[in-house]
Image (cartoon, grey):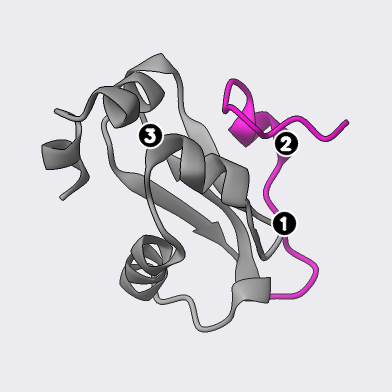
Amino acid sequence: MLSLLRTRTRLQRAIDDRPRLLMRDGKVLDEGLRAVGLTEIDLHSALRAANVHRYHDVDAIVLEKTGSLTVLHHAQPTAGVEDRLLTGVSGADRT
């Protein structure tokens, strides 16, 4: 689906530039979604495909350079994604 959208200039730049963070620690990053022309509904599809039941289970969703969405989530409350897995992902800096 997203590969078809690569023909759009704005989305193509965002995808071809570097991976982009769209959700972190259960919170949707609206700025990231706007930058690539996606909606929260698009994220819902990826969450369902990854068998995620609740937003607070999501550590991160990354739009990869290939146009696919990667969902990193946990089943235990103490789990979390290591920061180094998000190295090089736009919007992943915790400053």
- In the image, taking residue 38 as reference, residue 95 lies left or right, namely right
Residue type marked 1: Gly
First along the sequence among labels 3 and 2: 3
User: Which residue is tagged 3?
Assistant: 64
Instruction: Say above or below: 67 vs 42.
Output: above
Residue at figure coordinates x 61%, y 34% from the top left:
85
- For the residues marked 1 and 3, what is the alpha-carbon distance in whole angstroms? 20 Å
Horizontal and vertical percent for residue 86? 62, 33
Horizontal and vertical percent for residue 24? 66, 53
Q: Which residue is at the far bottom?
A: 53
Please identify the quadrant where the C terminus is shown: top right
Point out the frontmost of discs 3 and 2: 3
Q: Which mark is on residue 83?
A: 2
Horizontal and vertical percent for residue 67? 27, 37
First along the sequence among labels 1 and 3: 3
Task: Write the start and end of the magenta stretch as one range.
Answer: 75-95
- In the image, taking residue 84 as reference, residue 42 lies left or right, namely left
Residue type marked 2: Asp
Mark 3: give few (<14), some (14-19) or many (20+) Cα within 10 Å.
some
